[in-house]
Structure formats: structure tokens, C-alpha cells
Amino acid sequence: MKKTRDLFSIGDVARALGVTRRIILYYEECGLIQPDVKDGAVGNRYYTIDTFVKIRTIRIFQNLGLSLAEIQGYFDDTFDLPPLIRRLETLRDELDRHIETLRERSNAEPPQVRLIRLPQQTVYRRVLTSATVAERSVLLRSVALEGMRLYGTDVSHRMYLVESPLDRPDELSFCAAVPPESRGENVAVLPMTQALSIYHHGAYEELPAVAQRLLSAARERRLTPKGTLRRIYLEGPPQHKEARKFITQVALPIEDA
């Protein structure tokens, strides 16, 4: 049989999508696709543009973390779409956070104060008093370890943060991200809130000055702080030995305008 201009050979499809012939044949074995034309004499397979698009869709869904069974359910209209939408939204949010972190890590421009929304987050929280940076680091690690042992961790959110009242900066809430379904003593939900935010590259001892910059920005923009300050630790001693490379997101929650 001679291939027509309207059909793609299995080699054409494999080259166009950057996959192996074996992958396409495996999709056939799983019942996801079938060749539109098959040469009975030599077994050559040919596909229409519709099947080509379907294979491309399968690859996209696989790259998003869906199993072949879930993809089959999608094509058969037997898959419950709302959970899939929520999974993809979670993946999107996680990618946005990673992109944001990499952009800030590049430190290509002077850090800017931005108005953002801090997402709702479930945390394991212990309120403790501490006056030194060294002691705070020890306490945060201790609280994080307690939370992980009791509830596990939520990798979809920033993992470690410290929050304190503006008028009592030594009264600290040490927080570690835990799964949203966690329930128990010392588990709290931090609600979604607007905040002024800045990324600080440098030692933790410099953070009080960063907080003052956020308070000045709030006054200039006529925004009302809610009374707390949040420090979200992105990169520190586990990643870097030099304090100048530490990255901390400092956020000042504010009342909705």
C-alpha cells in the first residue's frame, strides 16, 4: 500500500512528537489509539491528523502526571473532571511558585515591594518567645520536625515560616506546612490575605530593616497593616553556607482595600 498525503506513518508521528515508535505501539496495546490504516501485507501503520492530535494530547496529559487509565477515562467521558481540574490547578500554582522563586533567586534586579495574596495554608504552629537569630533557627527546625512526625508535610506550600505581632517582635509563631486535612493540637489555618511582600537576599539579622521598609511602603500607599509580620524561609543554611545567599520572603499582611 502507498501512503497518501493525508496520512502520517508511525515514524512521522514519532519524529514530530519526539517519542519512540514503541511508545506509540504501547498506546495501541492499551486501547488508547488505533491505526487509521494498516497495511496487512507488511504491517505498516498510518494515522490521520485526528489521531496525531490525540497522541499529542496523551503526551501532554502524561507530562502533567495523569496515568494512562485516567487518560482513557478522559477520552471515554468516564473520568470525573473536577478532581482533575483541581490537580492541574495545584500543579499550576506549584509551577508559579517555583518560577517565582527562581526569578527572585536570580537577583537580577533590586528587590521590589509588591502587593500579593498569600494563599490559605494549614500549618503546625508553636508560639514561643525568642530574642536571637541562632535560637530562632533551632526552634524553627524543632517545630518543623514535630509537625512532620505528627502530620507529614505539604509540599505545595512554602514549608517553613515565622509570624510575629508588630508590637511584640520576640513573640514568634514558628510554623511548618502540613497537609490541609490535618487536625489536632497546634494545627492552625492561616487564611488567605493580601500582603505587601519583598524578597530579601542576605542575612537574617537584616530582616528587621526589611520589615521597616514594608511598613514605610504601607504608609506611602495608605494601606492598613493587620498587625503581624510573616517571614517565609525559601533558602538558607541547608542550601548555602554564605548568609548573603539566603533568600527570605518578608510579608506584611494588610486589610483588604
Image (cartoon, rainbow, N blue to C red):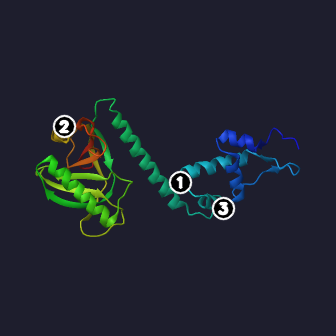
Side of 119 where 27 appears, left or right: right
Kindly state the secondary structure of the residue where label 2 is placed.
helix
- Mark 1 is surrounded, within 10 Å at the Cα level, by few (under 14), some (14 to 19) or many (20 or more) other residues, namely few
Q: Quadrant of residue 250?
A: top left
Tell me what residue is drawn at x 15 percent, y 58 percent: 128
Q: Is residue 150 above or below residue 9?
A: below
Instruction: Give the Cα separation between the discs numbered 2 and 1.
Output: 41 Å
The amino acid pointed to by label 3 is Asp
Residue 242's x, y, as percent? 25, 37
At mark 1, the secondary structure is loop
> Is 158 left or right of 53, judged from the image as shown?
left
Q: Which residue is mark 2?
A: 213
Disc 2 residue crowd, few under 14, some 14–19, many 20+, Cα 10 Å: some
In the rendering, at what x and y percent does residue 99 appear? 41, 41
The quadrant where residue 244 appears: top left
Q: Residue at x 27, y 59 (%)?
A: 145
Residues tagged 2 and 1 counted as in contact (Cβ below 8 A): no
Q: Earlier in the sequence, mark 2 or mark 1?
A: 1
Q: Is residue 75 visible?
A: yes
State the mark number for residue 76. Answer: 3
Task: Residue type at mark 1: give it.
Answer: Gly
Residue type at tag 2: Arg
Q: Earlier in the sequence, mark 2 or mark 3?
A: 3
Q: Secondary structure at mark 3?
A: helix
Question: Which-is-in-front pick, marks 3 and 1?
Answer: 1
